[in-house]
Amino acid sequence: MISNMLDNKVCLITGSGKGIGRAILEVFSAQNATIYANARKEGDLDEVLEHLKKTKAEIIPVYFDITDFAKVKSCILQIKKAHKKLDVLVNNAGMVSYEILGMINFDKFREMLEVNLVAPTYLMQMASKLMIRQSYGSIINISSKVATEGVKGQMSYSATKGGLNAATLSAAKELSSNHIRVNAIAPGMIGSERLKNIMEDKFEHKMNDIGFGRLGTPEEVAQVCLFLASDLSSYLTGQIIEVDGDLKL
Amino acid sequence: MSNLDKFNSVFAEVFEVEKSELGSDFSIDNVDNWDSVTQLSLVSDMEDEFDIMSDSEDILEFKSYDAAKAIVAKYDINLND
């Protein structure tokens, strides 16, 4: 992969301690970028940072819960003070649940709305403040294939991600005159640890629904994210890109 | 330039008015071009001028000259010097 795709770009990735977020951090780290890597708990990034210590990117760990607006704001201020700009926001942090309609836990649903939709919207608001000043930026929201098509057994989760898709499309329209791109990635079935743990023993049956006949990898999602973060996607905005190997839900 | 001068300059520039027109009755209710777009540029220019970052609730309250003064003061900007 060309290693200067994010030359001098300042990026913020939320939820970068594991799964797709960690893969995004790893893929971005191979580029000449400055990366603010967020995770919720102090120490959550220790392992990945150890693994990436020889990378050419500058990685700054920032620990906070994205639903804590005061902490989000102080992170954006920290970035503003240090660099006077933010080029890329990857809204990756999220939570998932698997429940049929009759079994929805509404406390969990409210919490999930906060994490998957309200907090990413606040992050877009704060990030766009810096991006508007430089008339440049790329915001990437990590959504889900289930948001565009719906799926049995994940009604509440799909609704939160559907909201994120709509927010992506609206933000793209509001921010296009400021030359800020806003896109979403909608992964299909990705072989992250989280999915493997939940879906244990059910993969064989699900594999028939995927045209490519295999799960996607977190790296395959991260590479699309790199494309959206880089200037290779300079004329692309308001798109929900499905990275799903032809998954039929 | 004092902080108050800077504050007034931002207002004058955003609303394209003379500084002498600014005062307690300068608000969303009687300024024609005070809409959500100008309000947002007002906030954003104030943030640049004083190197602050407003909370979302404060942005919504930027609806008059006096309210703006009170909000900016909350961020430890002394407008009386």
Image: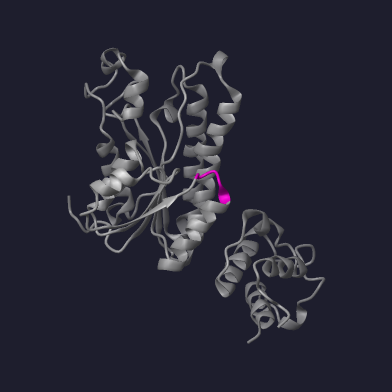
Vertical side of B14 occupied by A174: above or below: above
Residue found at the very far bottom of the displayed protein:
B1
Which residue does the image show at 43% across and 25% down from the upper left? A149
- For the question of whether residue A24 can be seen, the reply is no
Q: Is A242 left, or right, of B75 in this rendering?
A: left
Which residue does the image show at 29% across and 49% down from the upper left? A49
Q: Which residues are magenta?
A: A65-69
- Find residue A185 and report its image quarter: top left
Residue found at the very far left of the displayed protein:
A1
Q: Is A171 left, or right, of A226 in this rendering?
A: right
Vertical side of B81 occupied by A154: above or below: above
Which residue does the image show at 67% across and 54% down from the upper left? B57
Q: Give yes or no for residue A22 being in the magenta stretch.
A: no
Q: Give yes or no for residue A66 being in the magenta stretch.
A: yes
Q: How is the image coloured?
A: one colour
The dominant secondary structure in magenta is loop
Query: In this orientation, which residue lies closer to the viewer: A216 or A63?
Result: A63
Which residue does the image show at 43% across and 30% down from the upper left? A148
Q: Is A10 left, or right, of A129 in this rendering?
A: left
Vertical side of A245 occupied by A220: above or below: below
Residue B7 coordinates in the image, percent (x, y):
66, 77
Residue B40 coordinates in the image, percent (x, y):
61, 62
Residue A236 coordinates in the image, percent (x, y):
35, 50
Q: Is A220 left, or right, of A71 in this rendering?
A: left
- Find residue B53 and report its image quarter: bottom right
Question: The C terminus of chain A is located in which quarter?
Answer: top left
Query: In this orientation, which residue lies closer to the viewer: A189 or A235?
Result: A189
Q: For the image shown, how many numbered marks are present on the structure?
A: 0
Residue A124 coordinates in the image, percent (x, y):
49, 50
Query: In this orientation, which residue lies closer to the viewer: A213 or A12?
Result: A12
